[in-house]
Amino acid sequence: MHDISYQFDRSRISSEEWETRCDLAALYRLLAHFRMTDLIDTHISARVPGEEGHFLINRYGVLFHEMRACDLIKIDHEGNAVNSHHGPGSVNRAGFNIHSAIHAARPDIACIVHTHTSAGIAVSAQEEGLLPISQHALKFYRRLGYHDYEGIALNPEEGDRLVLDLGLHMAMILRNHGLLAAGRSIAEAFNQIYFLERACQAQVQALAGGRPLRTPPEAVCELTARQSDDEIDQELHQLAWTSALRLIAGDREDYRC
């Protein structure tokens, strides 16, 4: 059951923010649909259109499959709630530190996804990281950052190192922790985390087979990465996103409320 101890005033926000809220709530539910959740932990954030320094993140304690547009909290880069009726302590502090640093440093990024899936954690603990052994993995060939584990991300100073390790990439493996993916739109961020997760799943299963692995030639790896370039794939991101929304269209409670 949702906490109804607060009142959400939709009249106080713009139509652009409401659309972003609906899309972000949908992305939370899609991660639940694809079993990429970790109870109330992990988080997705989105930049608020037209509002410098403001972004949306989940109200801590709401499960991903029940996320609604009104459950998202608008915060600034200092972690302060903006025009919110939610009480103190309602934002995951570690989530704030990870997301705020990247949003502040990368104005090209509109949405950031962080997950703790079994496959993602498994690959994050493997010394070689993501291996170029599948078409899904080749999407990230030499286009993937790595960040060493520093404990639960409660130290704001870690943000600078996260940004440095991400560089200009749209995805990163957090060593001994999980996955991070981003996008210039919510649709692109969904595409990034979906394929990064699938690449990790394929790697874990391939290694479990106990047989020698085959890696394509370097030229083919680079070609495949260029063919998957996200500048080219923006229309495909939107097409996949629109199709994916049908997977949650029948939810008992609408995310657009």
Image (spheres, rainbow, N blue to C red):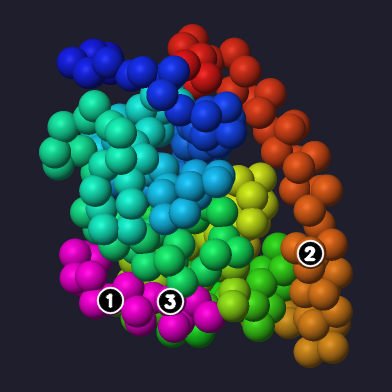
- Describe residue 217's horizontal placement relative to residue 1 as left or right: right
Give neighbour class at mark 3: few <14, some 14-19, many 20+ (Cα, 10 Å). many
Q: Secondary structure at mark 2?
A: loop
Query: Would you say the residues marked 2 and 1 are in contact, meaning their CB atoms lie under 8 Å apart?
Result: no
Write down the residue under mark 3. 163
In magenta, the rendered stretch is 150-167
| Vertical position of residue 100 compared to residue 166: above or below | above
The quadrant where residue 110 appears: bottom right
| Vertical position of residue 8 compared to residue 166: above or below | above
Q: Residue at x 66, y 45 (%)?
A: 187
Dot 1 or dot 3, earlier in sequence: 1
Q: Residue at x 55, y 46 (%)?
A: 50
Q: Residue furthest top?
A: 252
On whether residue 206 falls in the magenta region, the answer is no
| Vertical position of residue 200 compared to residue 141: above or below | above
**Label 3 is placed on what type of residue?**
Val
Res 169 seen here: yes
The quadrant where residue 246 appears: top right
Write down the residue under mark 2. 231
Dot 2 or dot 1, earlier in sequence: 1
Name the spot of residue 250 as percent of width and height, x first: 59, 13
Give neighbour class at mark 2: few <14, some 14-19, many 20+ (Cα, 10 Å). few
Query: Would you say the residues marked 2 and 3 are in contact, meaning their CB atoms lie under 8 Å apart?
Result: no
Name the spot of residue 3 as percent of width and height, x first: 23, 18
Residue 158 bears which disc, if any?
A: 1
Q: Residue furthest left?
A: 88
**Label 2 is placed on what type of residue?**
Glu
Label 2 to label 1, Cα distance in Å?
29 Å
Q: Residue at x 60, y 46 (%)?
A: 186
Dot 2 or dot 3, earlier in sequence: 3
**Front-most of residues 27 and 195:** 27
